[in-house]
Image (cartoon, grey):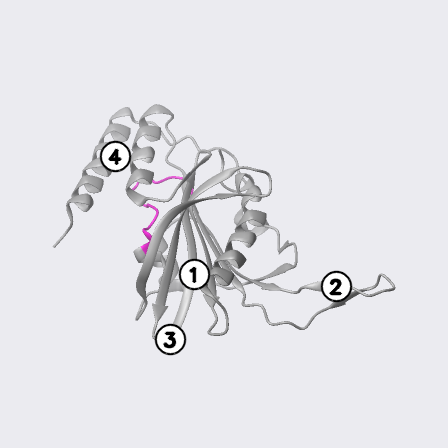
Amino acid sequence: MRSPRFWVVLLLLSSTLFVLQSRGDADRIPPSQPLSQMPERFGNWSAQDVPLTDDTLAVLGKGDFLNRIYTNEPSAETSSGASIVRHEHVPPISLFIGYFASQRTGQTMHSPQNCLPGAGWTFDAQKYSTIQDINGKNYKVGEYLISNGDTKQFVIYWYQAHGRSIPNEYKAKMFMVADAIRTNRTDGALVRVITQVMPSESFETARTRAIHFTQEMAPTLPRFIPD
């Protein structure tokens, strides 16, 4: 049975589509760089692209997508000043960004329940919080702890649109409705950061790792997700 929130969101989206179609306008789409130009390095984190499957792309719909694994290569200096690489195992960071230039035709950002790992994964805990990036800008995000058997992952997830960071999918859709009418823009993105909580580490260690990565990555987002 569908929840009342589902019907509220459906009504809002239907109303928006009706208004936009009545106006006969095309969405105003600000220029942006493709997500493929996202930096491949943040501090000691270096990237490897992970192609999305055709089935995943079919579910996501029409948009620009980034799916990467960032691995950490911590370095140190010797007494002579030379740089060496420490062979310490630091769990990788998964970064997914989906940018939709227009949501007029029904293509829309998905909820965490749809976009987080699927079969067998359960939501153990979630909360909203605020992360401040390295430039001092605040991002309102959702934090999730998910598990599949003995495997646990920590997730940071939010919607980014028109300079706003929104952790709640229903608020994100309501802002989209208002912006569609007010500015004729329906563009927006979802941002997801995941790291595994290793058996040998605490939850807080994994959380700190994901937050530090997000703090370094977030200032680049306006290049790809227009304010």
Helix, strand or loop: magenta stretch: loop
Crowdedness near tag 3: few (<14), some (14–19) or many (≥20) residues, C-alpha within 10 Å: few
Q: Which mark is residue 150?
A: 3
Q: The disc labelled 3 sits on which kind of residue? A: Asp
Which residue is disc 1 drawn over? 154
Q: Pick whichever of labels 3 and 2 is earlier in the sequence.
A: 2
Which quarter shows the N terminus?
A: bottom left
Residue 5 in the image: above or below residue 46: above
Q: Which mark is residue 17?
A: 4
Q: CA distance from mark 4 to mark 1?
A: 36 Å
Which residue is disc 2 drawn over? 76
Q: Nearer the viewer, mark 2 or mark 4?
A: 2
Q: CA distance from mark 1 to mark 2?
A: 27 Å
Residue depicted at x 32% and y 51%: 111
Q: CA distance from mark 3 to mark 1?
A: 13 Å
Q: Position of residue 95 (x, y in %)?
A: 49, 57
Left or right? Give the position of 37 relative to 64. Answer: right
Q: Pick whichever of labels 4 and 1 is earlier in the sequence.
A: 4
Q: The disc labelled 1 sits on which kind of residue? A: Phe
Residue 131 in the image: above or below residue 143: above
Which type of secondary structure does the marked residue at label 1 adopt? Answer: strand
191 or 225, which lies in front? 191
Residue range in magenta is 100-112
Q: Are marks 3 and 2 in contact (CB under 8 Å)?
A: no
